[in-house]
Image (cartoon, rainbow, N blue to C red):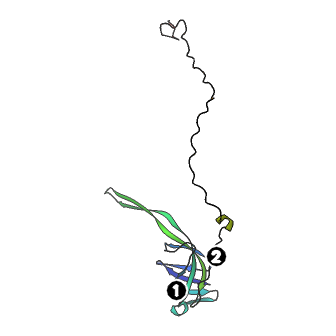
Amino acid sequence: MYAIVQQGGHQYRLAPGDRLLVDRMAAEVGSMITLEPVLLLGDAGGSASGLEAAKGARVAAVVVGHRLGRKLRVFKYKPKKRYRRTHGHRSRLTELRVEALLTAGQPLPTLPAPVEAAPAAAEKAPKPKRTRAPKAAAPAAAEPETPVVEAEPAADDEAGDAGFEEV
C-alpha cells in the first residue's frame, strides 16, 4: 500500500519503511508525527483518489534526525558591468521514517520504549572534579653538573686569524 502526501509544497509517494527528507520540522528526534493531507491512497489492486477515498487518512512517521542539506552556491553575474556575487546556503532538513499508513479513525502506532542504561551504572557516585597536581620539587641529590670547559686558542692563533694561511 502507498500514499501520496503533500508536505512543505512538495508531494511524496510513501510506503511503510520509507525514509524521506523534508524541510525542518519543529519536532523532537524519536517522536511520532503525522503527515497530512493525503492526496491519494493506492495498493496492488489499483488506486483510489479523491476526497472520499483519502478523507481522514494520514501517514505516521518517526523523526530520525535533523541535518543539513548539501551546500549550494548561487552566483550572480552581469556581463560587461564587473558585477559578480557569490552566495551559498545549506537547507535545514528533517529525516523521517514512515511507520504506517492510517485510514480514518485508526490510532497512531506506539513506539518501542528506548533502551535505558543498566541500573548499576546509575548508582555510581559522581566522579570528583579533576584538579591539577602540584608541581614536584626538584630532588636535592641531583646529579652533579658537568663543568663547561672552554677551548683554549692554539699557539699560532695569537693574531686572531685562526685557520687562515698566508700565501
* Percent x, y of residue 131: 56, 49
Q: Which mark is residue 39?
A: 1
Identify the residue under disc 2: 113
Question: Residue 115 occupies which quadrant of the picture?
Answer: bottom right
Whether residue 118 is visible to the viewer of this picture, yes or no, is no
Judge by depth and name the residue closer to the eye, 80 or 165. Answer: 165
Q: Is residue 128 above or below residue 61?
A: above
* Percent x, y of residue 34: 54, 81
Q: Amino acid at mark 1?
A: Leu
Whether residue 121 is visible to the viewer of this picture, yes or no, is yes
Q: Amino acid at mark 2?
A: Ala
* Percent x, y of residue 139: 61, 33
Judge by depth and name the residue closer to the eye, 82 or 128. Answer: 128
**N-term mark: 2 or 1:** 1
Q: Is residue 137 above or below residue 80?
A: above
Question: Residue 15 occupies which quadrant of the picture?
Answer: bottom right
**Residue at left offset 61%, top offset 30%:** 140
Judge by depth and name the residue closer to the eye, 62 or 53. Answer: 62
Secondary structure of the residue carrying tag 2 is loop
Q: Is residue 119 above or below residue 81?
A: below
Secondary structure of the residue carrying tag 1 is strand
